[in-house]
Amino acid sequence: MLIGGFQFGGWEVFGLLGNMAFGSRFFLQWIASERAKQSIIPIYFWYLSLFGSFILLIYFIHLKSLIGILAYLPNVIPYTRNIILVKRTEKSKVIDNEVTTTPDSNGEPT
């Protein structure tokens, strides 16, 4: 189907979904930073980055667009790595908190 002279079908909707996911991460980061009153990057920023990039990569593979494929293929590596690092840091904080709040033999927190 043509809308305003542009082809618009299932693949275009799929590509727009990826573009919306990828673009929405900036709004998420902005809102999170405003709430925290400092610049932060929430883990969902990385999930949206990964999801949007993956969708757009599939879209550009379908189009056989080398430029699009090369633009989104390498993104998987740093986005996945950042998710791993955030999860590792969260796990470390939980373990540290458990260690510091474990009662000693007298029942007092250590």
Image (cartoon, helix red, strand yellow):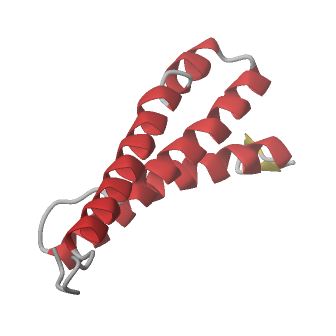
> Is 76 in front, or is 11?
76
Q: Position of residue 33 (x, y in %)?
A: 22, 67
Q: Residue at x 23, y 87 (%)?
A: 107
**Across the whole image, how many numbered discs are drawn on residues?**
0
> Is 4 in front, or is 66?
66
| Quarter of the image where one finds residue 27 | bottom left
Q: Position of residue 49 (x, y in %)?
A: 48, 45
Image position of 46 (left or right of 66): left
Q: Quadrant of the C terminus?
A: bottom left
> Which residue of the protein is positioned furthest toward the bottom in this rendering?
107
Answer whether residue 41 is visible to the viewer in this image: yes
| Quarter of the image where one finds residue 56 | top right
Q: Position of residue 102 (x, y in %)?
A: 27, 75
> Which residue of the protein is positioned furthest toward the left in this rendering?
38
Q: Residue at x 64, y 30 (%)?
A: 57
Q: Position of residue 18 (x, y in %)?
A: 62, 47
Image position of 40 (left or right of 28): left
Answer whether residue 9 is visible to the viewer in this image: no
Q: Residue at x 35, y 58 (%)?
A: 90
Does 101 sit above or below residue 41?
Answer: below
Does 90 sit above or below residue 103?
Answer: above
> Is 68 in front, or is 7?
68
| Quarter of the image where one finds residue 61 | top right
Does 101 sit above or below residue 63?
Answer: below
> Which residue of the protein is positioned furthest toward the top in this rendering?
66
